[in-house]
Amino acid sequence: MAARLESIRPHLSDVMQIVRLYDRTREPKGWLQIIRPTEFAVFATLADSGAVCDADGVPTSEEDANCIIFETLSDAEAFCRERVTQLPSLRFDILDAAGPLRPPLFTIVHPSRAAALDGSPAKLRRNKYAAIALLIVGPPLIWFDWAFYDGVQVVPTMLGINAILIAVRLLFMNVSYISDERTRRERAVQARSKAD
């Protein structure tokens, strides 16, 4: 695998280290004990299935799963962007030394797949329009049932209540995505400033 990765950007072999996530023969055994506080880990998965793979897009088993550790965030980002340009089926998550305790600093996919990511502008817009449509439909259904049938027809009321609840959930999801994105940006700025 190292030979294939070196052909991408030869100078990156000096700033990156491919590490198995867990190796019984190595001391320390886990990757979290190897990574330094100022380094960044890159994890590759297949964008369609989420299956673990290496940076060349070759699926790996759990025991052979690995990450690539970079000294700087900019090197990790450049590597990931270059790889997704060459292999659009890949998805890369860049984590800081805290590992999976926090969300990734960056999730990098091919531009053609960016709209499918949670929190993408297209998904936020779609959620907002769906919530507006549901809020427009829900209350009239409830009103119709109670105005004409005194609530005897339960189905319109149930549909109306569900439409309102789904709309509220979609709006809360958008607020959550926006909050997560703000937090991620703050962490990325902090990580970049530590490197300077």
Image (cartoon, rainbow, N blue to C red):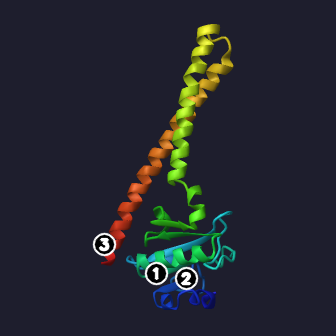
Q: Identify the residue at image location x=49%, y=87%.
A: 12
Q: CA distance from mark 1 to mark 2?
A: 11 Å
- Numbered-mark total: 3
**Residue hosting label 2:** 19
Amino acid on which the number 3 mark rests in the picture: Ser
> Picture quarter containing residue 147?
top right
Q: Identify the residue at image location x=59%, y=30%.
A: 163
Amino acid on which the number 1 mark rests in the picture: Phe
Say above or below: 25 vs 117: below
**Residue hosting label 1:** 70
**Residue hosting label 3:** 193
The reply to whether callout 3 and callout 2 are in contact (CB within 8 Å) is no
Which numbered disc flags the more N-terminal residue, 3 or 2?
2
- Helix, strand or loop at label 1? It is strand
Where's the N terminus, which quadrant?
bottom right
Which numbered disc flags the more N-terminal residue, 1 or 2?
2
> Picture quarter containing residue 2?
bottom right
Q: Identify the residue at image location x=66%, y=73%.
A: 62
Say above or below: 19 vs 174: below
Q: Nearer the viewer, residue 21 or 146?
A: 146
